[in-house]
């Protein structure tokens, strides 16, 4: 059911991508590539919304009190602090050195930094708890 229900979601995202790139010589290629790539995400979203936790074997009754949830909270807090400090220092450096960077590149860099900070914090919290 999730795969079937995820297909229209993926098609909708593909359609939006095709409309966004209306000047592209092959818009249907954009549609199909985007739809195929986003299909698993749409299916996963539908599965997460439809599945009842009580039907999953081994699923904890209260996932918010699990050890993984505690690791996640610790990692999110650590990543938040890393981003606050790096954004402040980055703003100062960019202001005083008059660095000119394209916004997509800058935001992509901060995304990678956030992802890495969270991953490292999560692994560190897991190792300290073990």
Image (spheres, grey):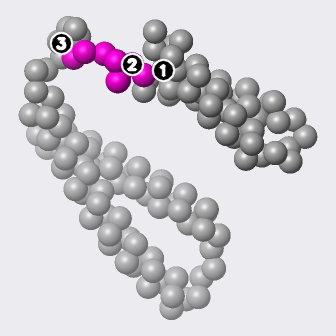
Q: Position of residue 45 (x, y in %)?
A: 42, 27
Q: Are marks 1 and 2 in contact (CB under 8 Å)?
A: yes
The reply, left or right, for residue 5 in relation to residue 100 is left
Q: Examine the rendered structure and indicate whether residue 105 appears above or below residue 44.
A: below
* Image height of 5 relative to 73, above or below: above
> What mark, if any, has residue 54 been given in the picture?
3
Disc assigned to residue 43: 1
Q: Is residue 126 magenta?
A: no
In the displayed image of the protein, which residue is found farthest to the right?
Answer: 25
Residue at screen point 76% across, 34% down: 30
- Label 3 crowding class (10 Å Cα cut-off): few <14, some 14-19, many 20+? few
Secondary element type, mark 1: helix
Mark 1, residues whose alpha carbon is within 10 Å: few (<14), some, or many (≥20)? many
Image quadrant containing the C terminus: top left
Q: Say whether residue 4 is left or right of residue 122.
A: right
- The magenta region covers 46-53
Q: Which residue is mark 2?
A: 47
In depth, the one of 56 and 72 nearer the eye is: 56
Q: Is residue 28 left or right of residue 51?
A: right
Whole-percent x, y for residue 24 in the image = 85, 44
* Residue 115 seen from this side: yes
The reply to whether residue 40 is visible in this rendering is: no
| Residues under numbered marks 3 and 2 in contact, where contact means CB atoms less than 8 Å apart | no
Q: CA distance from mark 1 to mark 2?
A: 6 Å
Residue at horizontal 62 percent and vertical 73 percent from the top: 101
Residue at 48% of width from left, 83% of height from top?
A: 93
């Amino acid at each position: 059911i999730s795969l079937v229900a995820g297909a229209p979601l993926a098609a909708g995202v593909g359609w939006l991508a095709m409309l966004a790139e209306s000047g592209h010589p092959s818009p249907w290629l954009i549609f199909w590539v985007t739809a195929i790539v986003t299909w698993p995400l749409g299916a996963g979203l539908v599965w997460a919304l439809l599945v009842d936790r009580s039907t999953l074997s081994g699923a904890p009754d209260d996932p918010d009190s699990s050890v993984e949830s505690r690791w996640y909270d610790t990692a999110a807090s650590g990543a938040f602090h890393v981003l606050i400090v790096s954004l402040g220092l980055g703003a100062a450096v960019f202001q005083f050195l008059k660095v000119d960077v394209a916004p997509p590149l800058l935001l992509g860099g901060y995304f990678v930094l956030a992802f890495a900070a969270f991953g490292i914090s999560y692994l560190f919290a897991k190792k300290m708890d073990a």
